[in-house]
Image (cartoon, rainbow, N blue to C red):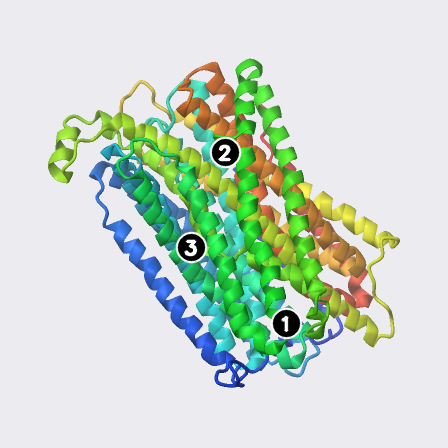
Amino acid sequence: MPRLVPRGLWIAAAACAAVLAGAHPAFASEASLKLPSFSEPLFFGGASSGASILIWGLVVSALGMGFGLLQYVQLRNLPVHKSMLEISELIYATCQQYLVTQGRFIAILWVFIGAVIVLYFGFLVDDPDMTAFRVGVILAFSLVGIAGSYGVAWFGIRMNTFANSRTAFASLKGKPLPVYEIPLQAGMSIGVLLICVELLMMLGILLWVPAEQAGACFLGFAIGESLGASALRIAGGIFTKIADIGSDLMKVVFKIKEDDPRNPGVIADCTGDNAGDSVGPTADGFETYGVTGVALISFIALAVAPEHKAVFLTWIFVMRVLMIGTSIVSYLANAAVARGQNTGKDKIDFEAPLTSLVWVCSILSIAVTFAVSRWLLAPLGGNLWATLSIIISCGTLAAAVIPEFTKVFTSSHSRHVAEVVAASKEGGASLNILSGMVAGNFSVFWKALTLAVLLFVAYFFSQSGLEQFMQHPAVFAFGLVAFGLLGMGPVTIAVDSYGPVTDNAQSIFELSQVETTPGVAGEIEKQFGFKPDFEKGKHYLEDNDGAGNTFKATAKPVLIATAVAGATTMLFSIILVLTKHYADLGQPFSLDLLNAYVILGLLMGGGTVYWFTGASMQAVTTGAYRAVEYIKKNIKLDSAEAASIETSRTVVRICTQYAQAGMFNIFMVIFCITIAYAFFNPQFFIAYLVSIAVVGLFQAVYMANAGGAWDNAKKVVEVELHAKGTELHAASVVGDTVGDPYKDTSSVALNPIIKFTTLFGLLAVEMGVANPGIAQVAAGAFMVIALIFIWRSFYGMRIASQ
């Protein structure tokens, strides 16, 4: 097995320290950004200040947390059979083991990042306000950001491992409605709590941290949550697909059923469902909301006219607070309608109420945005309130339209998925894979067109008077679109979290062996008051898992589109810093396609995306090979007993080790190559950031939708065609195992990679341009280190030849 080599970390740290030790003082940084005062009476004819309005935001956030915790308590108290509860608690125990291990790993990465922060802000920044106390503030808030990502991820796992066994047990009642309601309740609890925790932290900085310290706090917070989310998302994506592939291939090799209790890989697969599909998205969602908010705060502080900064910042946070209320109201109203329509039915379309929830929330959010914006911004005159409402609503509308286009290519009811199944009937795994690739490639065009149209609308309206209030209104418009994409955050997180619960619930049904336990039907009837229907329950869980697959797929392009639109706003900060620096030197700074460095940067950005895709999939491939090797040696098919706890834990350890080894290599490359390119040439670096965002968007959408098509094609074969154990099923399983790292490892991890690269690049490029004497030497040194870890990410992770 690969060893996570600590000396590699210290080699890079030593190189960094050596380079920075010879650096000249840099110019003042964005950490010195000063925010406006919120105490002035700017609203409602001088009757209210921004601070008094934002205080209500704290109240709403606290009430939202109460809602999330109430859902948690209600769900935990739902009835569940002991056999299912034991399995879900075992899954949670292995998840805890994984999270603790990842926590130690993140701590190692933070020590390295923390050392760079101290060196840079403590010794290199030529800023009299950059005291030791402020450096400590940046470090402290980076820990707050990590704790936020890590904490909400842990809560998500605990919530989902309550919901999985309760969903499995509810299916035995022979009615589909509870099988839909419980996973969504868990998802709403996670989504609302995540947004509320994020808001409490950010509002606390705005209201209680002195204005001259707030920039440092937000910077540290963004770096911390970005680091935590990147580690959890990438490592979780590698872990889950090692386990998933290792478990799924046993169905083909040994012709056993899915989630066969004798298979030691099944518990690891269930743990991976949470590590990859719960921990990763939850931490990623927390970071996405935070970094997008920080990007807009920075833009407003830099580019908006001084007399309007407090008004715009207050408006931004009021919009964010409103998403809590609109999401909860939409959820409760949609739940009441779904219950009224489906109570007593024996068959429902599990996707239909999830779809209606997304649209209800989107429409309500847009209506509330217009109403409240007019209430707050009308006194500024003109149509500012309408312009900003239209721009932000472009993002909110995209958050509903993009999932619809996603379902066209990934839903078990879609023609593209039907084509994958049809191709598999005659062409086996080969045509299955090719047909899924067609769906993924075709989907990219429609997603790009949708996003481009909505961004153009935002740009068009940004030219209608915003220049009176700020510089570069088009950049602000793109940032607002990203903000709007997150405008129904709790619902977006909820439908994404729906998937891991439905997946685990199906596994728990099989692993508990409740169906074959002697006397269990009578026991359930006596203890819980109903006669279990095992066949219906099993069918509902399998059918609902298809809906979970679909809606896991719908959240992915929303988050990646947010990363790209949000990166535009962060890129503006970098360009503004560089423009000011070169103006102080009497030199121009511009981006020109005739500049060779710009073309080279565009080339290397795309190349880096493909390196990352390959490196993350290499970790999955090698880890899955080791997992399959171990499972084959230890599976006992001549016994009726379930796999031992020890063999199951060993598979978990294999997955964890390869996830960490893959993540370590990837982190070191991203870190070192960002510094190398930033020091090499600023025009090259900005072009590199643009390219990594755009190419990353296309690659992520292609991989996510191709993977979703393969996944639900397998589900159609199993649920609708009842073809388990056939050659058709084997072909669909092979396609699904190809799609696993596509959709749940490489594609989803590009989101935090784009944001971390852009955010960290803001610091790196400042170091580079401020120290031209050592820039080329530093670029070469860090590029050599990056190439070492690029080599390790492939050749150090290869499957050894026999």
Q: Secondary structure at mark 3?
A: helix
Of the numbered discs 2 and 1, the one sitting upstream in the chain is: 1
Of the numbered discs 2 and 3, the one sitting upstream in the chain is: 3
- In this rendering, is residue 70 above or below 44? above
- In this rendering, is residue 746 above or below 74? above
Q: Quadrant of residue 609?
A: top right
| Alpha carbon distance from label 3 to label 1 | 27 Å
Q: Residue at x 38, y 38 (%)?
A: 502
Check residue 300 in the rendering and tell me which mark sits there, or answer none.
1
Residue 107 shows in this picture: no
Q: Residue at x 30, y 47 (%)?
A: 162
Q: Residue at x 21, y 44 (%)?
A: 79
Callout 2–callout 1 Cβ contact below 8 Å: no
| Residue 608 on image: x %, y % | 70, 45
Q: Secondary structure at mark 2?
A: loop
| Residue 600 on image: x %, y % | 81, 49
Residue lying furthest left: 526
Residue 95 shows in this picture: yes
The mark lying in front, picked from 2 and 1, is 2
Q: Residue at x 67, y 54 (%)?
A: 455
> Is residue 40 found left or right of 184 in the rendered image?
right
Give neighbour class at mark 1: few <14, some 14-19, many 20+ (Cα, 10 Å). many
- In this rendering, is residue 218 above or below 416? below
Q: Mark 3 highlights which residue?
A: 191
| Alpha carbon distance from label 2 to label 1 | 40 Å
Q: For the residue marked with disc 1, what is the amino acid?
A: Ile
Give neighbour class at mark 2: few <14, some 14-19, many 20+ (Cα, 10 Å). many
Callout 3–callout 1 Cβ contact below 8 Å: no
Front residue of 592 and 372: 372
Check residue 411 in the rendering and tell me which mark sits there, or answer none.
2
Q: For the residue marked with disc 3, what is the amino acid?
A: Gly
> Is residue 365 found left or right of 162 in the rendered image?
right
